[in-house]
Amino acid sequence: MRIGIVCYPTFGGSGVVATELGIALAEKGHIVHFITYDRPVRLGAGLANIFYHEVRVSDYPLFDYQPYELVLTSKLVDVVKHERLDLLHVHYAIPHASAAWMAQQILRSQGVWIPFITTLHGTDITLVGKDPSFEPVITFAIEHSDAVTAVSESLREDTYAHFPVKRSIQVVPNFICMEHYQGLVDRRVRERFAPNGEKLLVHVSNFRPVKRVQDVLAMFKQLRNELPVHLLLIGDGPERQHMESICRAERTCDEVFFLGKMTEPESILANCDLFVLASETESFGLAALEAMACGVPVVSSNTGGTPEVVEEGVSGLLSPVGDVDAMTANGMSILSDPATHARYKEGALRTAAKFDLKLVLPLYESLYSEVVERMKANGIHQ
Ligand code: GMT
């Protein structure tokens, strides 16, 4: 199949999932065209069957806001026609789904028929999407997509709860390639960040307020009274400076390491003892899944899709959002006893294996075939 993938090219989970999906499809022989404003951060160069089309928005002085959605639409029209695509798969509703619908209408007026699938990822529904200024467009784009998927049952329910949407939404969970996450133990990471045998906590996020990184720091502060621990923080974003100032005020700069954005966080994750996620909302929690795939158990807030990803008592422990005492107690109960820790590590691998690429990729492939066949059966195809 010839597939166009539209996504954010950044470190966010939606862009990572879209990129890994495109790479996996290309490895199976599909031709994949990424269409976005920058090269996706996890997209290596020179991969077979993969093409990248940059959406460039010119900086006209007339516009206070550059019309990215329109330029993306024009690019979609161009790529679909000239690369003879069979299907568009857009990740994150805003503005990708409405741009795909617009491109579909323009192409239809030219006698070209292209179906598009929208995958909802989380904040497009739970935060941004609920904003009344976006609601009518998102509702319309969801209703008019040829198929819609959500990355968790929780996100599917949130979509029905927050939008007047009637159509079916299929849950296709996020995935990881288990193979890729094995054999990454590197003693140099521990030598550098835990030179005296401290336990290593790790958190990965975009440091937005929704991630509640202050709760991660507060948990660390409590836990260090009980155990020798250090904390690694991967990623960057609006809250980072505030978090750094907390560490300076608390004099924990020698124990908390801000590592910034990383294209391969697994090289650090695989050498840590516990992943901590304290989010207010989290439709899935891809970073937690990546940690589990490295055999790292998770202590997380119990919100959105996290209970679908982290198996309580098997691969981690969950507690209410903002309950730092409970997170600390959960961290203690996993880390303080080596046998318990080993059991959770093994549980993390078992849970992660349920989200292996080998199980999830066929769900997308059969959805692609179904949508394309449906369009052909209705007598509309190129
Ligand atoms: O977490 C973010 O703020 C980034 C966001 C994104 O769109 O990239 O992540 C969302 O999509 C990920 C991939 O499906 C999910 O794993 C994250 O849970 C989800 N984030 C939230 O719901 C807050």
Image (cartoon, rainbow, N blue to C red):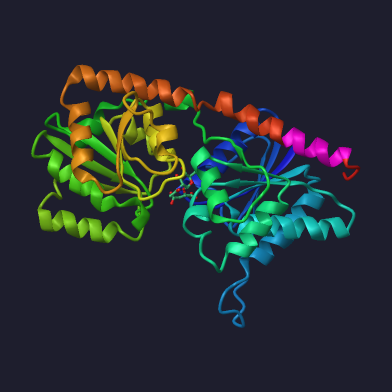
- Residue 154 magenta-drawn? no
- Quadrant containing the C terminus in the rendered view: top right
Q: Tell me what residue is drawn at x 60 percent, y 54 percent.
A: 93
Left or right relative to 134: residue 320: left
Q: Is residue 183 visible?
A: no
Q: Is residue 325 visible?
A: yes
Image height of 361 relative to 65, above or below:
above
Query: Measuring 12% from the left and 58% from the top, which residue is drawn there?
Result: 249
Q: Residue at x 68, y 65 (%)?
A: 71
Main SS category, magenta section:
helix
| Residue 302 or residue 75, whichever sits in front | 302
Left or right placement of residue 109 versus residue 2 in this view:
right
Q: Is residue 20 above or below residue 55?
A: above
Question: How many badges with numbers are in the image?
Answer: 0
Residue 314 position in % (x across, y down): 34, 23
Q: Quadrant of residue 324?
A: top left
Q: Position of residue 38 (x, y in %)?
A: 56, 55
The quadrant in which the N terminus is found is top right
Where, by quadrant of the figure, is residue 33 drawn? top right
Residue 378 image offset from top left, x and y in percent: 88, 42
Residue 192, percent from left and from top: 20, 36
Which corner quadrant of the image does residue 162 belong to?
A: bottom right
Q: Spot the residue most to the bottom.
A: 62
In this view of the protein, which residue sits in the foreground, 243 or 328? 328
> Range of the magenta residues?
368-377
